Structure formats: C-alpha cells, structure tokens
Image (cartoon, rainbow, N blue to C red):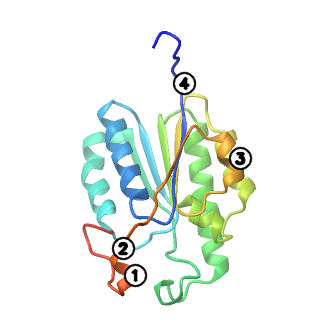
Amino acid sequence: MEDFKQKKSVVLVYTGEGKGKTSASLGLMARSLGNGWSVAFIQFIKYWEVSEHNFIKNIEPLYKDKLLFYKGGKGFYNAGKLSQKNVSEKQHKEAANITLQKALKCSQNGKFDLVICDEINNAVSDGLLNENDLKNLILLKSDGTSLCLTGRNFPPKFLKYVDIATNMDKIKHHYDQKYIANKGIDY
C-alpha cells in the first residue's frame, strides 16, 4: 500500500438499467454524513413524495447545515402514462436548468464535501440538459468536493472525467411482468 495515494475528491457515477442507483447514492450520503462531511442531495427528476424524501426530511434537523436537500424535478419526462400531466417540455427544461444551477453552486462553493446529483444522467439523456452542462459540472467542481452522478445513460465519452463508475445491470425486475413499483423498495 506504500505506493498508493489518496485523492482529495472523486467523481462517482451510478448508471445503468437496473435498480439501485438512487439507493446507492443514499448509502453514500449516509457514509459521508457519518464521516462528518457536509452533503448536498440534489434531485433532478422526482417531484412527488417518495420514501427518500421523507427520510432526508426527517434527518435534516439532525445534521442542520451539514445536509442540504433540493428537489428540483417536474417528474418523469417523455415517459408515456408515467409522465407528469400538464407540465410542458419548456417547464421540464426550466426546472432542470434551475436544478443544474443549484448543483453547480453547491459543487463550486467549497461548502460541501459531497454533492449528489440524483437522476442528472436522465435529465441529460432526455434532452432537458445538454451534455456540456454535465461535463462542466464535472470539470468545474471545487477540488475538495466529491460529486456523485446517478441515472440511466451516462455518456460513455465522459468516463475519462470520472474516478468510479458503476453500471447497475438489470437481471430481473417485476416491472417486466407488469407489476408497478413497491413503496419502500422502489421509491
């Protein structure tokens, strides 16, 4: 181990078609808070109340200024029946850009040790943000801030800018047999 060094911060990606990307980022948040770090958890897609929102809201008072939660999405975009009704493409893009500005601020101001951008990859893949927005977020972050990017379809050409990338592969999911998501498990 004498030849090994430690980086001041890292960029992590949780991507792929399988379940567990947000769950992994929540585990990372718990580990970081347990280490005394300041964490910003910024969500790009989910607007409805899901279990992680309840959890984070419950622990926020315990961590005071060490934990920031920002829910900036307008719901699923271009997802058929799952799409949020009465939300235009323009509104989705505006929400994504406002959320991106929050993520950029948190990742650049040096206040946070870890910034989690949950489902940002979906926002890029869906065209709500462009790839340069994602690249700039990665490249312009503060040297002391680690960054976690979750969601499907992380652009492979950006792997050269990240330190850790995990692809969540789906082996089997009950959704394929037309079962909806389970509260507490899937959301």
Distance from disc 1 to disc 2, alpha carbons, whole Å, reads 6 Å
Badge 1 local density, few (<14 within 10 Å), some, or many (20+)?
Answer: few
Residue at mark 1? 176
The image position of residue 117, as x and y in percent, is 52, 53
* Residue 23 in the image, given as x and y percentages of width and height: 36, 56
> Which of the two labelled residues, at mark 1 and mark 4, occupies the earlier sequence position?
4
Mark 2 or 3, closer to the camera? 2
Q: Which element is circle 2 on?
A: loop
Q: Amino acid at mark 2?
A: His
Report the Cα–Cα distance between label 4 and label 2. 36 Å
Q: Earlier in the sequence, mark 2 or mark 3?
A: 3
Q: Residue at x 35, y 85 (%)?
A: 177
Task: Say which of marks 4 and 3 sits in front.
Answer: 4
Three-letter code for the amino acid on which mark 1 is drawn: Asp
Q: Are marks 4 and 2 in contact (CB under 8 Å)?
A: no
Query: Residue 1: x percent and y percent?
Result: 45, 14
Q: Nearer the viewer, residue 41 or 80?
A: 80
- In primary-sequence order, the first of circles 4 and 3 is 4
Q: Nearer the viewer, residue 92 or 20?
A: 20
- The numbered mark at residue 7 is 4
In the rendered view, does 84 fall on the left or right side of 60?
A: right
The Cα–Cα distance between marks 1 and 4, rounded to whole angstroms, is: 41 Å
Write down the residue under mark 2: 173
Q: How far is the residue under mark 3 from the one under mark 1?
A: 36 Å
